[in-house]
Structure formats: structure tokens, C-alpha cells
Image (cartoon, coloured by chain):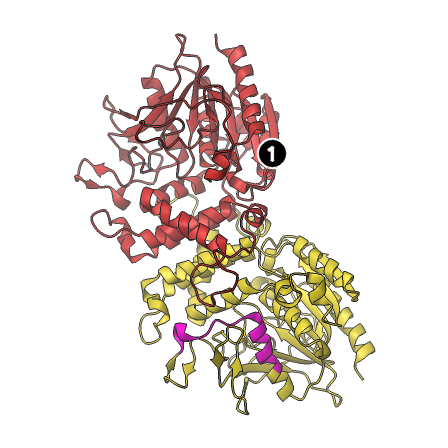
Chain colours: A yellow, B red
């Protein structure tokens, strides 16, 4: 969505950021996952921007969504200038101001962007894990991240921030490590996946598994399930947009002609856009990682997993202050789900601000440059910083 | 959805109905389609219920949706008791009362339920058409139906009724053959496919075309693209339901156990349901037909095709009275699209009633037994009958 990215030019980029990796090389070297299986050694790819202050009190952990990675802001080198996925929000003078805060972003386990996942080599077999990789949960992802934060010597995160599947990790952080989280900003997310969200994920997984090249997850030395993954991405992409955003962005406009082609080539702009998104995605993402991360999202249920079924009880476990943000046109995690979350946070006696942002861009809205969103997040973090860090 | 079908038992079934077929055997024997290609001879499968009165003034034409067929009500034999797809609405004493009206329903061209379509034999090659079948439009479907109505000797239809893609045919009938339509009931439909609706159709088509068994549409003598078609149907099925209906029907309930399986088998009820729907669909539907009918729906744009871009101008071509019905939870063709339609019908000076029905079942709501819906349609048809037929 480069056309929107370019609109935002408040503040500078953080400049060159370094790819880093943290491996659980010290005992126990492995984790017992929620499924009961062991995984290790585990590597987490991560990046940081800004400087950690002497008291280690200005750390902001950013959690990425399904297809995200550790590259949250800046660029990797003058030759590889591709900005991070939230470059509009993270940088000097931006919403998450790297002049003030030390930003950390790590790739989740189960992904394919540098951290241990189904596509990385299993040291025991010296082959990619494939479907032998254990099914990980949002809780497992967060527990792995915690070892990174420990390794960085940070006792308390000033804030954890993330949208979508990243927002689930935010919530998990708050209730799992309450002593380590001062403030939390879950955006465009939910405390549990609805049947609708599960349904879309399941259909996308079926699309991957229907591709004969998927070969039960064992494809790393042959043809990849590119068509299946492309269809899965297209399904996802439709759910990230909205009726309104698609009407504004594409309407019924044809690609490059005035008349119908009367065949099955892409001709509506929205068709070309989706095919392009599907095609681009398979160049950078692993089909098995898609299966594992969507499954983790489907399993997520904060109340069930941390409150014996009660959302309030789950939030009673944390002491964080919250800024909850939803978007009017997000139909994947609609506002009513954020409102339920806010109600439970309040009932748990916590400090919570809630904002529903009028935005036509659907679920994707949290990723799109928005001065109002940057301002709200910046203001909230400033207050937290002034009151907690020193 | 048998659990809902059983709730409705107002009125009796029409009993045994006969499968019939009409073939354009007389000159011209073929049609020039909107794409410019010729198709013929064309066969239309159709069924009727009730009796045509002496004046041939009590005919109600019902138009089916994407995966529907001519079997609208009753059963085919005591051995094959499967009721028609709208048996809750059509029958003696029901909303569309076969004691009073002569109901006709014909399978659309491009489909695979008895009418000429990509899976039927091309007389020139003595092979199934496959992708050589021309891309047909809603207009072509309606023009073919018109030859059937002519053949039945009916000069004017008392009413045309249909939901979804059937509703598009209703609108097309009104503006294309104004002298032949007294009243029209478009349900859960739109005057043009939105970008969102096109997007879902395109992703579903991509799922079919990604299946190697699809073989560019040439699969009738080998393995069929069943996995691709199943995924396509699952995508469709999610769009037919709603967030609310899925929450009520499935929630996060697991299939038959209390704990997660930590693998990729179906475990949430919604997953099993979708896989079952996909599996059942491939037993009865043709993948190419799915491609052709979704394409026809995507092409549909009443204003563009009949009003030089103006919806009002399109409706100025008809003299029908309208009953427009939408459903609160239908997000495929949301109420605002029906409201736009109603506004244009009013501006064209026509008689129109509009009803938005509170229903949690999403787009599928028009197919689900609903005494209120039956009552409204029954009342509207009675008034039309009393005023026009005698």
C-alpha cells in the first residue's frame, strides 16, 4: 500500500537497523510447549531501534501480525532501503518515538522470517521441520519472546504494542508476565477468535493443503505449494479490507479496457490486485508458517486460557494500563469485540482508554499511516513514560 | 440446514413434480449471446407446480441462485423425496401458494443441473463444452428463460421472484421484458456486484483453477477438481453466513472433545461444518459451472447495462411493481445496496415496498423458513393477483 505509506512523512526514519538473532543457547536450551512437546534450541530474529536508557525503563516491545517480521522500522542498508512494516508509526518524532524509547520487535516462533519455525532446520534430523514442527500457541510465542527480553536485561517493559495477531500477544504478555508490563496497546484485535475468523483461517489452510505441492508439509526440496498459498493469501486479503475500502479503491473499474473480456483472465482491478497480492506473498512467505500461525490465532482465547472462562478474571492477573483501539470498518475483529475487552478490563479495576477510529480501510487500518492514530499512541506512551520511567 | 427446514410446516408440499426440459428446437435454434458468440441448440431444464389458469394470468417465475436448480418445491418421486430448495416458501397455502399460482422454475444456462452449460455436450464436437463454452451473462440467462415462457404460451408473468443471483435475474427480467412482468420480488440481491463480492468470487475461482485436476476446464473424462471446488464452496459458504449466525451456530465449540488436538485436523465445529459443505457440494456441482455463474454475477450491473450508468433510467424501462427485501446480517449484498435500488425505483415513479428483515442468518436468510417472510410475500402476491389476474 505504498500510495498510503508515502502520505505520511511526519518524523524521520530510524535509519539503518541491524538484523539480530537471539538463540536459547543456555540451559534449558529448549521450551516445553503448551502442546506438551519440546522445542529447542530456539532462535528468535529481532531488531531494535533507539537506545535503551541506563535504567532500562524505556523499552517498547512491538508484536507483529500474521505475516509480519522483526523489521518494524528503518531499513537494513543503503542498498536495501525497504522500510519496516510500521515505519509510519516507529521512528524519531513519530507515534512510537525512537528518540525517547528503545523499540524491540522479534519475529514469532512458528514464522519463517528468521525465528524457529516449520521451515527451519530441525537439528535432530538436519532437515526442515515441516509438519513435524509442534503446533505452537500465542502463549508459546510470548514465552519465547520473554527469554529475549530477559537476555536484554530488561526487567519491565514500558509498553507492549501490537495489532491483530500481535494484539493477541499483547494481551498474553499482560496476563502472563504482569510484573513485566507497565502499559499495553492492543489494536484491531480480539480476546478470542470468533467462528467467522476461524472459518476464514480454515478455508485458507484448506487452500494450501489442497495444493498437491504442499505434500503434507514436505516440500522444501521441491516445488512449493505456491498456488495454494496464493489463494490463502487472497482469502486473507479480502478479510483485511472492507466493503467500503474496496469500493473506494477499486469499485467495478476494469484493469485496462472499457469492455468485458468474456473470459477468465483478471479484468476487474480488484481481481488483478488480489492476484498480485497472492503472487507477491508466495515470494516471501512459507505455506507451513501460514498454517501454524493461523492455528495459533484460532486457538487464542484469553478468558478460557487465563480466567477459567471469565475475561474479567483473566485481566485481574495484570496491572497494566491499557489503550484499546478498534477501527469502524474492521469486520474481522469488529469493534464490539474490543468493547467487550474494555468492559472486562474496567471490571478488573484497571486503567483503560478506548478509541474506535473511523476508518474505511478495514482490519488493515492499523497499518496505514494515520496522524490521529500516531498522535493517540504518542500521547499515551508519553504519559506512561512520564509516570513510570525514571 | 435441515434443523431449520423442519421448523417450517405451514402448508403441504406440492407433492410429486416432474422434471421437464425445453429445447430451442425451432429456428433460430440458437442464441447470439452478449459476448457475440452463438450458442445452440439450448436446452432448459424446468419444473412447474400448480395449474396455469385459462387466462394464463397466474404464472410466477422463480429464479434460482448460484448453485440452485429447477427443483424449487415438492419431490421427484416417492423414492426420491428430496424437497425442492424453496419448499418452505412454495406449495399449497404457503407464501407462494400453488393452489392459486402456477409456479415455473428453470435451471439457468451455464449451470450443470440439466440446462445447457459447460458440462453438457457440444453437438459440434460431441464432447463437453468445457472452457469453450461462451461466457454467459445474467441477460443471456433471462433471454433463454424468455423462450421457455413463450413456449408455455404465457404473455405476462404475474410475478418474477428470486434471491441473490436469482434476484439479479428478477431485475433483468423487469427491464428487458417490461411488457411481460406485472410484479417483481428481488430478495437479498443487488443491482451490481460490489468489489467485495467480485473479490470473493475471484478468490473462489482461483481456488478451482489452482487445482491441477481442473486442467484448464478439460476434466470430464478424468479426475475432477474436487479439492479446488470444495475450497471455492467453503469461501462462498462463509460469505453466505454472518458473524452472528456463526457465533450462534458454532461459536468456538470443538467437534467432539474438550481439548485442542494440536494438529491440522478439523476440530472446531465450524471447521467440520465447512469441510462437510465443501465435500457435499462437489458431489452435485460442476467446477466449470461455478466459474461461469460467478462470472455472470460479477458482470451484472443494471445501471451500466440498461440505463447508461443511471439506475433510475434502467428502472424507467419497466412498469412492474416491486417488493424489495433485504436482511440485516447479509454482508454480501448489504441493505444499503437494496436501499439504493429502492430509491431508484421510486424515482422512476414505480410502486415499491421495501422490507429489511431482522435476521441473523446472513445472506442465506432468504432460503431459511421464516413465517414473516412467507407472510409478506404471500400478501404482496395476493394483492397483485387480485388486481392484475382475472
**SS for dot 1:** strand
Please name the predominant secondary structure of the magenta segment in the image.
Answer: helix
Say if A86 sits above or below A251 in the image. below
- Asked if one can make out residue A268 in the rendered structure from this viewpoint, the answer is no
Identify which residue is drawn at 27% across, 51% down: B224
Position of residue B381 in the picture relative to residue A215 (left or right): right
Write the residue at 25% across / 38% down. B120
Q: Residues within 10 Å of mark 1 (few under 14, many from 20)?
A: some
Q: Kindly give the residue lying farthest to the bottom in the view shown.
A: A26
Count of numbered tags:
1
* A101 vs B263: above or below: below
Using the image as rendered, state which of residue A9 and residue B170 is in the foreground.
B170
Q: Is residue B123 above or below residue A57?
A: above
Q: Is residue A27 above or below residue B384?
A: below
Query: Is residue A65 toward the left or the right of residue A202 in the image?
Result: right
**Quadrant of residue A312 in the image?**
bottom right
Q: Residue at x 33, y 22 (%)?
A: B148
* Residue carrying label 1: B357
- Is residue B230 visible in the rendered image? The answer is yes
Relative image position of residue B333 (x, y in whole percent): 54, 40
Q: Whole-percent x and y of residue B249? A: 54, 47
Q: Residue furthest front?
A: B257
Q: Residue furthest right?
A: A387
Q: Which residues are the magenta region? A: A129-146
Asked whether A139 falls inside the magenta stretch, the response is yes
x, y percent for residue B221 = 20, 48
Please name whichever residue, A143 or B223, is drawn nearer the observer in this view of the structure. A143
Q: Position of residue A120 (x, y in %)?
A: 43, 80
Instruction: Please say whether residue A3 is one of the residues in the magenta stretch.
Output: no
Chain under label 1? B
Q: Is residue B66 left or right of residue A166?
A: left
Q: Nearer the viewer, residue A64 or A109?
A: A109
Amino acid at each position: 500500500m505504498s500510495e498510503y505509506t508515502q502520505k505520511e512523512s511526519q518524523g524521520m526514519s530510524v535509519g539503518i537497523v541491524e538484523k539480530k538473532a537471539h538463540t536459547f543457547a543456555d540451559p534449558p536450551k529448549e521450551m516445553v510447549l503448551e502442546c506438551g512437546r519440546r522445542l529447542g534450541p530456539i532462535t528468535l530474529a529481532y531488531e531494535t531501534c533507539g537506545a535503551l536508557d541506563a535504567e532500562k525503563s524505556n523499552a517498547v516491545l512491538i508484536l507483529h501480525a500474521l505475516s509480519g517480521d522483526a523489521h518494524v522500522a528503518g531499513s537494513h542498508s543503503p542498498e536495501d532501503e525497504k522500510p519496516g512494516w510500521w515505519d509510519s508509526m516507529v521512528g524519531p518524532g513519530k507515534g512510537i518515538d525512537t528518540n525517547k524509547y528503545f523499540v524491540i520487535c522479534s519475529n514469532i516462533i512458528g514464522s519463517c522470517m528468521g525465528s524457529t519455525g516449520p521451515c527451519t532446520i530441525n537439528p535432530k534430523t538436519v532437515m526442515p521441520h515441516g509438519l513435524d514442527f509442534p503446533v505452537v500457541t500465542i502463549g508459546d510465542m510470548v514465552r519465547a519472546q520473554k527469554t529475549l527480553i530477559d537476555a536484554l536485561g530488561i526487567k519491565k517493559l514500558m509498553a507492549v504494542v501490537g495489532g491483530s495477531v500481535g494484539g493477541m500477544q499483547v494481551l498474553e504478555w499482560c496476563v502472563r508476565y504482569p510484573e513485566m508490563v507497565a502499559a499495553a496497546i492492543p489494536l484491531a484485535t480480539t480476546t478470542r477468535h470468533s467462528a467467522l475468523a476461524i472459518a476464514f483461517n480454515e478455508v485458507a489452510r484448506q487452500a494450501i493443503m489442497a495444493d498437491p505441492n504442499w505434500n503434507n508439509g514436505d516440500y522444501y526440496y521441491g516445488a512449493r505449494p505456491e498456488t495454494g498459498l496464493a489463494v490463502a493469501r487472497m482469502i486473507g486479503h479480502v478479510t483485511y479490507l472492507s466493503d467500503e475500502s474496496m469500493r473506494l479503491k477499486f469499485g467495478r473499474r476494469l484493469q485496462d479496457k472499457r469492455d468485458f473480456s468474456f473470459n477468465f483472465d483478471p479484468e476487474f482491478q480488484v481481481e488483478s490486485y488480489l492476484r498480485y497480492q497472492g503472487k507477491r506473498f508466495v515470494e516471501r512467505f512459507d505455506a507451513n508458517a501460514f498454517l501454524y500461525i493461523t492455528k495459533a490465532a484460532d486457538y487464542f482465547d484469553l478468558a478460557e486460557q487465563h480466567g477459567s472462562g471469565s475475561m474479567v478474571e483473566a485481566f485481574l492477573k495484570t496491572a497494566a494500563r491499557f489503550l484499546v483501539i478498534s477501527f469502524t470498518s474492521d469486520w474481522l475483529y469488529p469493534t464490539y469485540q474490543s468493547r467487550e475487552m474494555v468492559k472486562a478490563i474496567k471490571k478488573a479495576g484497571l486503567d483503560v482508554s478506548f478509541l474506535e477510529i473511523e476508518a474505511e480501510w478495514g482490519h488493515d487500518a492499523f497499518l496505514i499511516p494515520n496522524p490521529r492514530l500516531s498522535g493517540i499512541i504518542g500521547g499515551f506512551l508519553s504519559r506512561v513514560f512520564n509516570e513510570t520511567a525514571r
